[in-house]
Image (cartoon, helix red, strand yellow):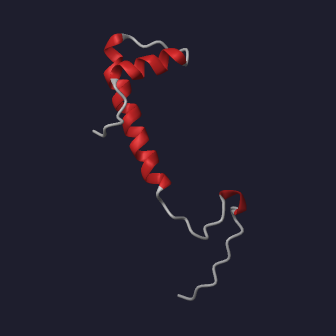
Amino acid sequence: MSADALTPPEAARWAARSGLPLAPERHAGVAAAADHIHSVVSLLRELDFGDTPPSAAYRAGEEHNHAAV
């Protein structure tokens, strides 16, 4: 667990601040889930997509397959 991991009391405070009060027995589970989501998003932010066009540039059904078999 990293030094900046969300603690159960912090998870409860942020949930309450968002209008979603949590039962005390859910604090640890919510904190663990939030930490996992944060770690996944952090990995995704490190990906280099280079010249990959945005998804809005893709048109389904307009693929042109020019490869020879």
Q: Quadrant of the N terminus?
A: top left
Total marks shown come to: 0
Q: Residue at x 55, y 19 (%)?
A: 18
Q: Quadrant of residue 39?
A: top left
User: Is residue 64 shown above or below 33?
Assistant: below
Q: Residue furthest front?
A: 3
Q: Locate residue 27 relative to residue 16 in the image: left or right.
A: left
Q: Residue furthest left?
A: 1
Q: Residue at x 48, y 19 (%)?
A: 15
The percent coordinates of residue 41 (x first, y second) are 46, 46
Q: Residue furthest bottom?
A: 68
The percent coordinates of residue 68 (x first, y second) are 57, 88
Q: Residue at x 71, y 62 (%)?
A: 57
The percent coordinates of residue 66 (x first, y second) are 64, 84
Q: Residue at x 66, y 60 (%)?
A: 54
User: Is residue 33 shown above or below 52?
Assistant: above
Closest to the observer: 11 or 63? 11
Closest to the observer: 49 or 64? 49
The percent coordinates of residue 35 (x first, y second) are 37, 35
Q: Quadrant of residue 6?
A: top left
